[in-house]
Image: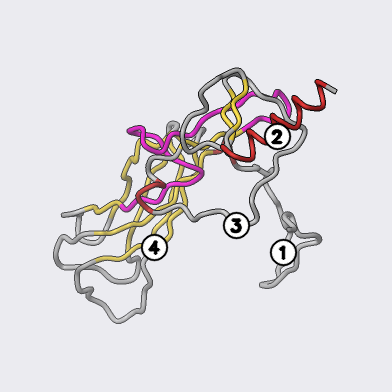
Amino acid sequence: MKTLFSTVLSLFYISIYAQVGIDTDSPRAGSAMDVNGSMKSSSILLSEILPPITATERESFIYLVQDQTTGAIESLDLSASGTGGISSILTYQLANVNGDWVLNFDTKISSSDYALVILSAWFDQDLEGNNPAPPVARTKEENGTWRLEADYSAVSSDANGTWNISCVVFPKTYAKIFPLQTVNMNENSTAVAATPIVSY
């Protein structure tokens, strides 16, 4: 009877104060439950409606990623200098290039640790020539880092200009990397993959 009374009293206390402290007599303000120590749970229940993260808050969040094989947990601190998140977007403005030609710009970004993808590229000068030519911008790996190239192959600029190249960087740690996909086109200009490599 005493145990039942204590349980009821505890539940009454929790419902009034709406805060639970485990291994602490003073739960921190703003927390419905404050655990002073480690915690293990077979499942985590989340509210159906989660408040959105603002742009200002996004810069100060720390994300936790767990390795499913070893159970190791790694933190992603977006506020730390020189670190990225699941992906990072950046723009290189390469000014006063040789006409419209960038042969090799070393980003110093490790090609073994990161993937670098160009999103867009544009050049700020007029071009001379009659052949239509879209800008050609690409990435390449050289000596362990990512390099950028940019050029208008069929036309040229009579003045040194500026390239703006927007890129996205993905840490390879958090990306699933597939082996090289080799396809024999059998001298055709069209083909269909046998199976989708990725299917959601």
Q: For marks 4 and 3, give the CA distance.
A: 36 Å
Relative side of 27 to 185, left or right? left
Closer to the camera: disc 2 or disc 1?
2
- Image quarter of residue 34: top right
* 159 in relation to 97, above or below: below
Residue beneath disc 4 = 120
Marks 3 and 1 sit apart, C-alpha to C-alpha, by 49 Å
Label 4 to label 2, Cα distance in Å?
A: 59 Å
The magenta span reads 66-91
Q: Earlier in the sequence, mark 3 or mark 2?
A: 2
Kindly identify the amino acid type of the residue bearing the numbered disc 3.
Answer: Ile
At horizontal 56% and vertical 19% (from top left) the residue drawn is 24
In the picture as drawn, the residue positioned furthest to the right comes out as 1
Cα–Cα span, label 1 and label 4? 28 Å
- Name the side, left or right, on which 134 lies relative to 29: left
Q: Position of residue 57 (x, y in %)?
A: 39, 47
Looking at the image, residue 22 lies above or below residue 31: above
Q: Position of residue 188 (x, y in %)?
A: 70, 71
Residue denoted by label 3: 49
Label 4, secondary structure: give it: strand
How far apart in space, not on screen, are marks 3 and 2 (Cα)?
Answer: 26 Å
Q: Residues within 10 Å of mark 3 (few under 14, many from 20)?
A: few
- Give the residue number, with chain letter if any, for mark 2: 11
Q: Position of residue 75 (x, y in %)?
A: 51, 30
Amino acid at the residue labelled 1: Met
Q: Which residue is nearer to you in this view: 65 or 186? A: 65
Q: Position of residue 83 (x, y in %)?
A: 40, 35
Lower position in the chain sequence, tag 1 or tag 4: 4
Pointer 1 residue: 185
